Image (cartoon, rainbow, N blue to C red):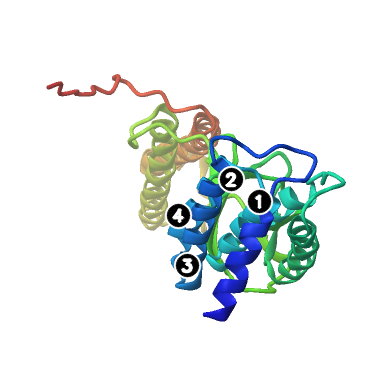
């Protein structure tokens, strides 16, 4: 209780008008002291938001660096350390008149020491991401590669570059300095292939493959026919060598096997050519951007 009385007295002294000025006729300084003392009671009970409102109210009635100092202290107790640092800096920018009350001078001295202590406690991060990315921390723009002071607790860090985006949530504690957050983008989406499998490239590739398969089948049949033809050669033939007088008989026996062999060779060669062309066509179509055959229909219901 004695501490509260001492602080209340300090607040009262804080708003004393310098001796070179006249007393205010509307009593704003007195009402400012009343608001500040009310804020002090709330501060002592840990009601930070209510206390902060009272100190701001007092500052609005009558300017005093002591009111700003208590605003900084309240923000610090509420865990809003970045705002507290800003309030301390506001106190330190104060240009005091030569006849400023002692409490005002004490406020600057206390603000300097308390700001230094808070700077040792406040955590910070360094965001690393690809060049050109736009970085935000809790929705506010931030600079990549530079130290960013943050309040203790959870923070959402996002980066965006064109259509790609990424994010990371971090939880910081007091004195956690220069915590590095590395953000990487997912691979750029490649150009999509045309929907479905029935495309010119796939059709040509399929035809080439079918021709190769058919050529292989016909080749097997040709070999079988050739084997039968060899078995059916006249007895006068020595292996594959036959008399001229039996040429017509031999050719009639082997004609079917030769025809099948030629067909097989044509199918294999032609199928291979078509297959290669189809693969090239299919790959070149895969690099083309997808165009929908029909525009998407959207529905909107209005009330």
Q: Residues within 10 Å of mark 3 (few under 14, many from 20)?
A: some
Residue tagged by mark 1?
15
User: Quick one: 155 or 50, which is closer to the camera?
Assistant: 50
Q: Are marks 2 and 1 in contact (CB under 8 Å)?
A: yes
Q: Are marks 4 and 1 in contact (CB under 8 Å)?
A: no
Label 2 residue SS: helix
Return the disc, 2 or 1, that comes first in the chain's sequence: 1
User: Quick one: 80 or 55, which is closer to the camera?
Assistant: 55
Q: Say which of marks 3 and 4 sits in front.
A: 3
Badge number at residue 29: 2
The x, y position of residue 290, in whole percent, is 43, 28
User: Quick one: 181 or 186, which is closer to the camera?
Assistant: 181
Return the disc, 3 or 4, that comes first in the chain's sequence: 3
| Residue at the far right in the pictured view | 98
Q: Quadrant of the C terminus?
A: top left
Badge number at residue 236: 4
Residue tagged by mark 3?
41
Return the disc, 4 or 1, that comes first in the chain's sequence: 1
Q: Is residue 279 above or below residue 31?
A: above
């Amino acid at each position: 209780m004695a501490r509260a009385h001492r602080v209340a007295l300090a607040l009262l002294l804080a708003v004393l008008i310098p001796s070179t000025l006249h007393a205010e006729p509307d009593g704003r300084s007195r009402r400012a002291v009343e608001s500040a003392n009310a804020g002090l009671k709330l501060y002592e009970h840990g009601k930070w938001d209510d206390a902060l409102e009272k100190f701001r109210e007092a500052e609005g009635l009558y300017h005093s660096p002591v009111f700003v100092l208590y605003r900084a202290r309240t923000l610090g107790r509420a865990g809003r350390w970045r705002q507290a640092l800003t309030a301390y800096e506001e106190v330190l920018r104060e240009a005091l008149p030569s006849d400023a009350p002692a409490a005002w001078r004490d406020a600057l001295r206390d603000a300097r020491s308390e700001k230094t202590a808070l700077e040792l406690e406040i955590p910070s991060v360094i965001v690393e991401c690809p060049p050109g990315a736009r970085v935000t921390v809790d929705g506010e723009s931030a600079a990549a590669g530079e130290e960013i002071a943050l309040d203790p607790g959870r923070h959402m860090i996002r980066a965006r570059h064109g259509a790609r985006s990424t994010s990371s949530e971090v939880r910081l504690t007091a004195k956690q300095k220069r915590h590095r957050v590395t953000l990487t983008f997912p691979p750029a989406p490649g150009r999509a292939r045309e929907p479905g499998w029935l495309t010119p490239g796939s059709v040509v590739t399929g035809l080439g493959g079918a021709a190769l398969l058919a050529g292989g089948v016909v080749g097997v049949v040709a070999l079988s026919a050739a084997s039968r033809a060899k078995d059916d050669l006249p007895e006068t033939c020595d292996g594959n060598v036959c008399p001229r007088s039996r040429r017509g008989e031999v050719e009639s026996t082997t004609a079917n096997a030769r025809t099948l062999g030629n067909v097989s060779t044509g199918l294999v060669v032609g199928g291979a050519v078509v297959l290669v062309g189809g693969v090239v066509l299919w790959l070149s179509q895969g690099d083309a951007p997808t165009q929908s055959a029909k525009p998407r229909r959207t529905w909107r219901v209005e009330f």
